[in-house]
Amino acid sequence: MSGSRGTGTPHRPKTAALSRHWKMAVLAAAGFATMVSTTTVVAVTDAGAAETHPATAVTNSGKSKVAPPAAPARDGVDADAESQDGDYWAEHAGNPGPNDGGKGDDRSGSKGEADKEGKGDSGDKRGKGGKENRSASKEGKDGKEKGSASKGDEGKEKGSASKGDEGNEKYSGDRGDHDEKHDYKRHHRDHDKTFVECDPNELIVAIIDANQDSGGDLYLAEDCTYTLTVNQDGNGLPRIIQPITIHGNGATIARAANADQFRLFEVGAGGDLKLSDLTLTRGKTAEGQEGGAVNVNSAGRLDLDHVTVTNNTVDDIEDDDAGGIYNAGVTTIRSSTFSRNAGEDGSALFNDGGKVEISGSKFTRNVTDASDGLGTIRNFAGSLKISKSLISHNTTDEGGGVYVDEGVAEIERSAIVHNVAASTGGGVFLEGQGSLHVRHSTISDNVGTSGGGGLDLEGSAVIEDSKVDDNTTTQNEAPGGGIFVALQQEDAEVAIRDSTVSGNQAPGNDSVGGGIFVSEGSTLTLTDVKVTENLSDEPAGGIQNNGTVNTNGKIRIIDNVPTNCDGSAQPVPNCFG
């Protein structure tokens, strides 16, 4: 949904009866909730095939075992990684853990061996009224979702442990200086740590207790799948209202395939939820709600570290936002992967007036509504910072990678590549009241079907030390293969410096400005910029200037087809031919 929004899902008054309600729900659902003893985790691969990984959370005696939480892998990062540009982070961003829902996706970066989806089959000239089938967005509509759990989700797991084993589970966890093992019934505490056996009911009870005890640290069973079946107020787990940290230990939290529609987590006022080494999958919002995996209210906080958010969706992709995360509060995302999530706007992440910081993360193969969906990541009137991240192979109507309206967005040392917008802004769309800062980044191989193959800029923007290469438009009269500048505010201006705009195309009939298109009334300032080897059907192929272009420093506008700047309504300084 476009335009102004509220604060997300309305707050509901909570009383002491909440915990009693949950405990009664747990008891009532005991015959339906799944206890996974011998667990199989299924990761959806690039081609949609399933890889099975036998869980290691079962001892020889068939009893669940919580191992000491292992530090998430952070390999593959050079010592000088902090100074690397977007091409480097295209190779290294994302959650490297075994449950990475985007496993095998697009690690080749902006120019590597990744399939050129963005330039090939995705430039299909979808119009505003066009619709296409999306496996991720339609998941769960008929109760036959593709997910990360096996058929055991419906209560028929294969395993060696029976219900009778629940009473005497053995846990071996990180106890500081202690190495000894103890026998405990259900979940148990040790030095303010709660170890949660492989049972969704025990996770529910542990969160209820943590909320009542002013917070807590929860350690999940290694590689367990916690399959949720209980729904309360649109949530599969109790609302987070205290500081709670959940150490996933490679576990997965999933909504059961035959369960009611609900998201997995809601973070309410005062809630501070930290998740690590965990997969969140198959969340699906109830009617009219947002945030298929997590909803963060305006006074809530969320921190994700090495988390995979995959195959989450909303009730109606044409009306409900944020298949992955809806944020109206403060959210921090590190070394995480968002894949195959679906929603109308912000298929992976919708920041609604809040603050979001993303680093070292990957957003791939997420989809919005084809006719009017906005952005894989949408920032509305909030603060958004993206660094050292990869945004690739996503599909929207406008803003294939990032959509910014009313707010400030910073993109640093990141790669936005192979995304498709059925309308405009294949990589990035900036509305008139927003502002954008891009540094040390690569925006390449994106498709803006009707304009702005790489970027559609309608508000103030700065692009520096960056590359805008090999983007394209596909329709007739679709200008700005690389960058489309059409400023909506009188005092707005776009500045590009120390950057290259190269190899972009606007090949449709009567299309102009293969490299850059500047509309009437807009102002663009170039400093030390190369505009080379761009192509359009009609002149000018390099820069089509219908507004004002200023140049400073070393400017190279060469080898563009059919002309560099000739044919523009207004001159471009330091441009010949």
Image (cartoon, rainbow, N blue to C red):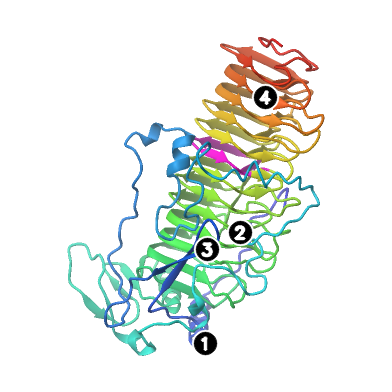
Q: Which residue, given by chain and number where applicable, does mark 2 sit on?
A: 323
Q: Is residue 23 above or below residue 337?
A: below
Q: CA distance from mark 3 to mark 4?
A: 47 Å
* Quadrant hosting residue 248: bottom left
**Amino acid type at mark 2:** Gly
Q: CA distance from mark 1 to mark 4?
A: 61 Å
Looking at the image, do the residues carrying marks 3 and 4 touch, with CB atoms under 8 Å apart? Answer: no
Q: Earlier in the sequence, mark 3 or mark 1?
A: 1
Q: Which dot, 1 or 2, sits closer to the camera?
A: 2
Q: Which residue, given by chain and number where applicable, does mark 4 sit on?
A: 493
Q: CA distance from mark 4 to mark 2?
A: 34 Å
Q: Earlier in the sequence, mark 3 or mark 2?
A: 3
Q: Which residue, given by chain and number where applicable, does mark 3 sit on?
A: 49
In the image: residue 139, left or right of residue 391: right
Q: CA distance from mark 3 to mark 1?
A: 36 Å
Q: CA distance from mark 1 to mark 2?
A: 29 Å
User: Residue 28: which disc?
Assistant: 1
Which SS class for mark 1? helix
Q: Which dot, 3 or 2, sits closer to the camera?
A: 3
* Quadrant hosting residue 143: bottom right
What are the residue bounds of the magenta stretch? 399-419
Q: CA distance from mark 3 to mark 2?
A: 22 Å
Looking at the image, do the residues carrying marks 1 and 4 touch, with CB atoms under 8 Å apart? Answer: no
**Amino acid type at mark 1:** Ala
